[in-house]
Amino acid sequence: MNFLLTHKREVATLAGEHLWLVGTAMLIAILLGVPLGILLTRQPRLKTLVFGSTNVIQTIPSLALFGLLLPLPWLGVRVERLAITALALYALLPIVRNTYVGVTGISGAVREAAVAMGLTARQLLWHVELPLASPVILAGIRTATVITIGVATIAAAIGAGGLGEFIFRGIAMVDNSVILAGAIPAALMALAADLLLGLVERFLAGRQHANA
Amino acid sequence: MSSPEHKSAADSAEIEMLGVEYRVSGDRVLLSKLDLAIRPGETLMLLGRSGSGKTTCLKLINRLLTPTAGDVRVQGKATTAWDATQLRRRIGYAIQDVGLFPHYTVWKNVALVPTLEGWDRARIDERVRQVLQLVGLPASEYGGRFPSQLSGGQRQRVGLARALAADPPILLMDEPFGALDPLTRAEIQHEFRQLQRAMHKTVVFVTHDVGEALLLGDRIALMETGRLRMIETPDSFLRSRDEVARLYIEAFEAGHRVGGVFPPSVTQ
């Protein structure tokens, strides 16, 4: 604990880097994952392909994924770029899956009524599908965020910074207090994200009452 | 192509089915050789068992389905020639499961189609107030509620109000009162009859309840295994010698004898 308290400034800097890595990766994952999930509800033929590949990405050990991306031309040039890409790929599965499940889980009667009322595909999406699926989509984003905060500690292995710096340094120094200086803030960050997104999720779910 | 007589018949019909067939995955025939003309302002009841093709028939009208053979014409134009959205905005649709949007208040549910149609705010407000009043749910009391805060009967009324909101000339109803308790159902059936007398919409109403068909219909179309068996006014239906029709009438009269489940006004 001592180390954590004496290195407050460094902890803050690394926590900032960590947050930036996670935040950017999540933003990319959401911008990619939600439309992809919606696409799957329109083109179910792509389901096997997309779920198959996102699943495979999840099974690659994170350290290996960072390593595997390293020799790629544009990505390998800057380690942050690479770390963010890897993290975004990891976060993709829960987001795509929950978007798909959320949209396909909407009651058949609601969808039929909406189509019969003459809603266009776009109106159906914005007025019905996205609002009704939003709690489920957000649950996916929440899971992905918590995972990403943890996985992002490994980004330090390729020199991309973040709280993992302390963890790797602590392991090298065989000094638990240094490891904890990275692990504790990362754990707190994950808890805070979980709590915050949980509140947003509750708010969204509460607003629409029972999905009757 | 068509004879003058045929043409005039087509002109006076709001909805027309011409040799309509609907089959799924090649060989399962849900509807075959259906010919039917529905006049403007008429309430046509589609009566039949589950699987007789009633709902399929209804969905062909607002193009939730398209016929595999023949033509379904709405206001003289084949549904396949209509722009789907344009067609559906002219047709109100109320179903047993209602399908209210759970994330919208009663008000927003009813206001949606007029809003999408680009009506101005004042007109929307007035219309929503009006149709909610019409179905017996004053906007001041019910407008702000969510569907989950309503009883089954109230939800069904909101569904009807929503179907009527943009004042469509045609109304399709698929067992809209089927899930209600008998007393609420009788109440809402009577209200609907009053309402229909005032609004003169062309209504196609699916039911398996003879009492409902006799009470609400100007004509009753009896469907059996994907075919139209007969189409009669309630009076001639009651007098019909057709064996299937007799089965329905006997079941209906038996229901009457054991305790008047059906409103007495039906047989007057």
Image (cartoon, helix red, strand yellow):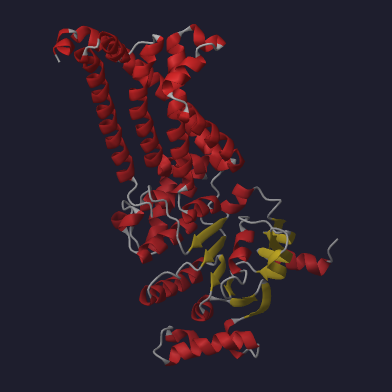
In the displayed structure, would residue B265 be above or below residue B70? below
Rendering quarter of residue A194: top left
At horizontal 57% and vertical 60% (from top left) the residue drawn is B169
Q: B24 or B172, which lies in front?
A: B24
Residue A46 in percent (x, y) is at: 59, 38
Asked if residue B237 lies left or right of residue A11, the reply is: right
Looking at the figure, which quarter contains the C terminus of chain A?
bottom left
Q: A168 or B16, which lies in front?
A: A168
At horizontal 65% and vertical 47% (from top left) the residue drawn is B83
Looking at the figure, which quarter contains the N terminus of chain A?
top left
Residue A96 in percent (x, y) is at: 47, 35
Rendering quarter of residue B159: bottom left
Residue B93 in percent (x, y) is at: 52, 59
Q: A46 or A54, which lies in front?
A: A54
Would residue A50 be seen by someone viewing this image from the given angle? Answer: yes
In the displayed structure, would residue A87 be above or below residue B17? above
At horizontal 46% and vertical 14% (from top left) the residue drawn is A82
**Residue that sits furthest to the front in the current view:** A174
At horizontal 33% and vertical 24% (from top left) the residue drawn is A150
Residue A210 in percent (x, y) is at: 34, 52
Asked if residue B86 lies left or right of residue B76, the reply is: left
